[in-house]
Image (spheres, rainbow, N blue to C red):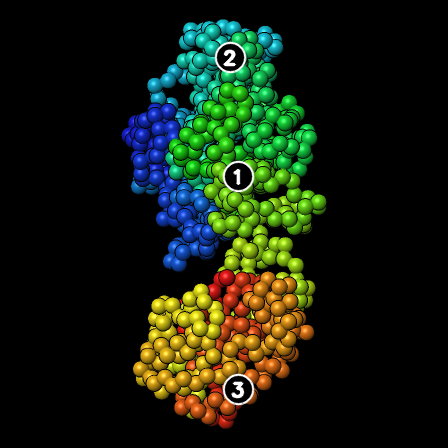
Amino acid sequence: MNRLFWLVVFTLSTFSWVACSGSSSSSADDPDAVEGDEISQQEDPLSENGSSGVVKLDSLGRPISSASEPGKDSASSSSSSMGPVVGVEDTLITDTTVVEDVDALPECTSANEGESFLVKSENTLYFCLGENWIESDAVAETAGITCRGGVMVIGSGDDGEDDEGGSPYSQWGNFGQQQQVVFSIDSTTEPRIVGARIVGVAEKGPFRYGTSVKLVELDSMQRLADSKRIHKTCILNGDGNFSFDSVDLASPYLRVKASGYFRNELTGGLSPSVTTLEAVVDVTDRDSVNVNMLTHMEAPRVLKLVENSGNNQPIRAVKAQALRDILASFDIRLGESSAGGGNGWPGGWNQQQQQQVTTDGRFAEDIGLFDGDEYSGALLAISIMMQRKGSGSEMLSYTAGIAERIKGNGNWDDNNAKADLADWLMVLDTSGSYATIKNNIASWKLGEVPEFAHHLKRFWTNVYNFGECGSHNADSIRFVSNSLSAFFVSGYDQPGPKVRFICDANTHEWRAATDLEKDTYGFVGEYEGQLKSGIINKDKYYIYEQKKWRAATSNDIQEFEDLADVYKNLKSGEKVIFLLRHAERTNDTGKNGHLTDTGKSQSQGVGAKMKGEDIYFANSTYTRSKETCEYVAKGAGATYTENTIDDLDGEWYVKDDSKYATCKTDNGGGWGANSAYAYKGICPEAYYDFEDRSEEFLQEIVKPQFAKVNRVGVMISHDTFVVPFTAYCTNRKVNLRYFDTKLWVNYLAGVAIIMDASGKMRYVPVKGLDSGTMTM
């Protein structure tokens, strides 16, 4: 020991070392001057690894990809193997001053004199002094170690505050009375207890070595204001534990402050700046005090409750109430007694007075992250919530704002802020980030990670007014009806954010519904092969098959191809007849109705796609059909000769006009009747057999026309014929199911009938305009 003492003395007389997690730069700043502020970039292995944790999100806020960016060094990724937490922009900061065992310590030389490393296997700090690695206990015993600004200083140091000594421990005198002890204290006040030992753990995640911990005695004569009696120690381990082995106290009422870097649950690394959390406690009958986010948030409420009592109650008399108020503000139930039960209570999420929370006599300073009980889970849940805006100074500002609202009446009554927090938690939940957080914490190997996710889920589902998820409402789907949420929609199928939520029948928990679940919610399958567009994603389609719905694939739906592409890709020896609906018409639907000017322009545009081609034309008996042929020819620079085919008029499939009229009336008009006939085979008394009649048209009307076609023909008909005929030619894979999807054939759309040299025909749905369908 003598050799070590003189070694340290010699070293300190030669250098002024700062052991800032391995840094050799010095800092004499008062730690309170940097609390919550960003630390300037010192030579500090609290190193930024270039990973911001920002990920690209989809419309729900889910990560498009959680894979690591190519080229990133594996050491720069989170300790979690599951990727970054969604929506968290904190820079991942890894601690490069941790080694597994003593053998892994780097060589101690003059170049790294004063640096420190934590040896995980021993949970012990080692300092490089005089080219030797020396345990922190030995350094503290011979030279002393103090902490300020999240860093360690070898030597007793001086941060401008008086240290108080102590002598052997003795019991409190009359401080056990259940009323406020009134006294005034200053630096000359005689201590009422000497040599007290007070221990605890500082956690957000756990605060790291270099954290300063202060006991500030409170003056009951000054309404529990901070006195100048301050006691300090330093955390010298990796799990946040601190110890005051012998302090003299004149007051049992203390403000305990921990200032340093903490392990960040959301990144798995360290906090980006020094953070200060505190607790206001009464140590009359206790010798352990934890400092955490619960103690930090309840401190203003504790002092307010004492004030409300006329300063006639001791702090310990209001602690249970303060903790209940904090927990209730975040819908956390421990040993709950709630009339509503489950995820919600009667009256809605903003009526917290109906909730009752019990804490079994526990105080916030009794709770630790790794205690293995439900209180640990509650602490972790609130710790996560408080990082809504980040984990640096913005976290403390956010927390302070909420604590200030709770202080007055015990209720966080800011519904806008609650909705914002709920949105963030929901995105974390639905992206799988809760598992990432759990994995981050587990990687610290400090104990079993408490269950926290159900507290977070309860909060956001209550804010969204979802109520309980159980067997009675399994598989039911909800939308966000809270107008303060960024995910609010006015109705299930209304425009806006597309996220919907389902009560999972297996887990009895709310989760984000898949596209299939939300798009087919309430659908009733009527026939095999039925196709419907999604309720939410209206551009997606779903098919009913084997008594259940599934997402339609390219094998189920044949898309319309551009007429120009089909024309250009004709093979040698092939001919094509484009059988199309006429162009845009006026409101006159009679035989003498004309095209609009737009319809004429549309027709010329289609003709231009076949510029210079010698086109064979055929038209129905309707004027608009003839005009369509005329303007197509004009656009192509071809000659139009009128060629009228009565069977193109549109009622080819109708067998009985009277029964057809009834069928239309019963099925919402001709669009509904004709499409349902093509896809479902309705009204057999009104229509011919679908397959036989379609094949008859191909063989007796279309096929003979090919003899008159050099290479390209255009036949213009009407929607009531083009819809079922196109459905037949594509084996019902083209989506013209007006009765289900409200999609109808567009102008100048239909089917290309392509014949090869052997007389074999194939069919392609085609569009002359941008879309082959229109929504009616």
Q: Which residue is mark 2?
A: 307
* C-alpha separation, residue under disc 2 versus residue under disc 1: 36 Å
Q: Is residue 231 visible?
A: yes
Q: Say what amino acid the circle numbered 2 marks.
A: Glu
Dot 1: element: loop
Relative side of 515 to 33, left or right: right
* C-alpha separation, residue under disc 1 versus residue under disc 3: 60 Å
Q: Position of residue 407 (x, y in %)?
A: 50, 21
Query: How many residues crowd mark 1 within 10 Å: few (<14), some (14–19), many (20+)?
Result: some
> Is 94 or 99 nearer to us in this picture?
94
Q: Say what amino acid the circle numbered 3 marks.
A: Ile
Q: Position of residue 3 (x, y in %)?
A: 40, 30
Dot 3: element: helix
Q: Which residue is mark 3?
A: 701
Q: Which residue is mark 1?
A: 482
Q: Nearer the viewer, mark 1 or mark 3?
A: 3
Q: Nearer the viewer, mark 2 or mark 1?
A: 1
Dot 2: element: helix
Residue at horizontal 56%, vertical 84%? 697
Q: Nearer the viewer, mark 2 or mark 3?
A: 3
2 or 1: tag closer to the N-terminus: 2
Q: Quadrant of residue 309?
A: top right
Residue at horizontal 53%, vertical 20%? 409
Q: Say what amino acid the circle numbered 1 marks.
A: Asn
So how many labels did they put on this image? 3
